[in-house]
Image (cartoon, helix red, strand yellow):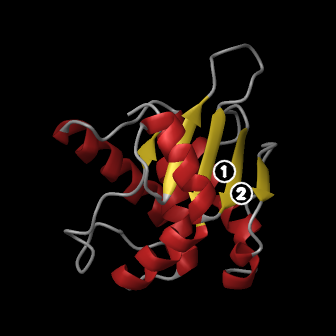
């Protein structure tokens, strides 16, 4: 996942539990962002936080007072501006990875790709949108050597994350 890029993405590790759980967390995030966005997309910032912080963000921006795995916050379009921000919660991500029989690194890569696709305008509100977004996630994850998260035994597992927009 450590591809050379011209990207200037930022990773903010707010909760040190991320480093204890996955020492290569920053490289995984940056690699997944580079694959999902390509070298020429505007930069993003990724916040690696805890359940409490993401629950507050989810309540404030989506009206849902519960922790979630990933939130995406697209930036207002402007020349040379950032694409947006992604926030991930360690507790939810660890629990989901364990329940789905995934490594934390594979699940994290999936959620970063998922969030990045939200920043690029993908969504999963309607069934056809969800199929399109999931197919793109699978395609991008395959480039990283990450298995299809929607393939058995993962079929039927809840769809990842949410956009702050919906």
Instruction: State which quadrant residue 83 falls in.
Output: top right
Q: Is residue 123 visible?
A: yes
Q: CA distance from mark 2 to mark 1?
A: 6 Å
**Along the viewing direction, whichever of 16 and 57 lies nearer the viewer:** 57
Q: Are marks 2 and 1 in contact (CB under 8 Å)?
A: yes
Q: State left or right for residue 114 relative to residue 15.
A: left
Vertical position of residue 27 compared to residue 41: above or below: below
Q: State left or right for residue 136 relative to residue 33.
A: left
The mark closer to the camera, 2 or 1, is 2
* Quadrant in which the N terminus is drawn: bottom right
Give the crowd class for mark 1: few <14, some 14-19, many >=20 residues within 10 Å. Answer: many
Residue 30 marker: 2
What percent of the width, then of the height, locates residue 60?
53, 37
Instruction: State which quadrant residue 119 falls in.
Output: top right
At 37% from the left and 34% from the top, the residue drawn is 166
Secondary element at tag 2: helix
Q: Which residue is mark 1?
A: 34
């Amino acid at each position: 996942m450590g591809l050379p890029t011209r990207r200037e993405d930022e990773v903010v590790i707010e909760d040190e539990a991320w480093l204890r759980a996955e020492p290569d967390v920053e490289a995984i995030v940056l690699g997944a962002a580079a694959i999902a966005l390509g070298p020429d997309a505007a930069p993003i910032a990724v916040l690696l936080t805890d359940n409490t912080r993401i629950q507050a963000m989810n309540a404030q921006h989506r009206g849902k007072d519960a922790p979630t795995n990933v939130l995406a916050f697209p930036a207002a379009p402007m020349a040379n501006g950032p694409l947006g921000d992604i926030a991930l919660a360690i507790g939810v991500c660890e629990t989901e990875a364990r329940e789905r029989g995934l490594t934390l690194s594979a699940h994290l890569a999936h959620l970063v790709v998922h969030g990045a696709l939200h920043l690029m305008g993908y969504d999963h509100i309607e069934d056809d949108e969800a199929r399109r977004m999931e197919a793109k996630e699978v395609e991008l994850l395959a480039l990283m050597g990450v298995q299809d998260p929607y393939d058995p035994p993962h079929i039927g597992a809840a769809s990842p994350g949410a956009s702050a927009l919906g």
